[in-house]
Amino acid sequence: MKSVFTVAVLLAAPALVLAQSVPASTVPATGKVAAVKSAASAPRAGIRRSALKAVEEVTPIDDDVSVTLSDADLELAKRVFVGVIPCELGANVTITPSEKWPGFFLVQTKTARFRMHPVESRTGAIRLEDPRAGAMWLQLGNKSMLMSQKLGQRLADECMAPDQVVMAAMLKKNPVPSILDAPKSPVEK
């Protein structure tokens, strides 16, 4: 009960700050409407980052499922690595399957959360997307990465689940020949 009250207070705090009106002294007396900076556009200096994170963690991600998954998508979802996946530079990505919606996943980093679903790819890579947020999780045989298509950058790179670590080690020992390499002659084989 205590946590419900805390969440309610945290959710109401920004609304109380934004509900304050602009003082009359800032409006010009000429009768013309001037551009006045509203409280909504002011930075949220009074709210701590930890409070914002606490509110974000308890706020459910959009429950509207307008995406219908095919049987192939549901089969693809079975191959997605779940759990805490370590990435480069000490980052982690946590992938949790949705209990409510089969085939959907909650993908979290330290600063962001996405609700993703599998999308079939021509290359055979496992691809999860959140079209609303513009994010994509790409899972290859030897590594994975989380990308923001809106920002045009990678949010997490070189992420490796235990099976991917084994595959990466195997590829270092026995690299796959590039399609750009010259084919071996029958004598070399």
Image: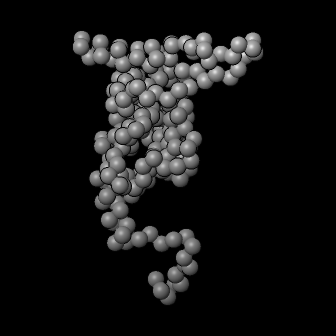
Q: Position of residue 169 (x, y in %)?
A: 32, 65
The quarter of the picture where residue 170 lies is bottom left
Rendered position, 84 above or below 18:
below
Q: Position of residue 78 (x, y in %)?
A: 38, 39
Q: Position of residue 114 (x, y in %)?
A: 44, 34
Side of 183 relative to 114 (left or right):
right
Q: Residue at x 52, y 49 (%)?
A: 153
The quarter of the picture where residue 38 lies is top right
Q: Position of residue 179 (x, y in %)?
A: 55, 70
Q: Residue at x 36, y 40 (%)?
A: 110
Q: Residue at x 39, y 55 (%)?
A: 158
For the residue pair 29 and 88, the one nearer the viewer reads as 29
- Whether residue 100 is visible to the viewer of this picture, yes or no, is no
For the residue pair 46 and 149, the one nearer the viewer reads as 46
Task: Say how many tags the image has.
Answer: 0
For the residue pair 51 and 159, the one nearer the viewer reads as 51
Q: Quadrant of the N terminus?
A: top left
- Whether residue 23 is visible to the viewer of this picture, yes or no, is yes
Rendered position, 9 above or below 143:
above
Rendered position, 156 above or below 36:
below
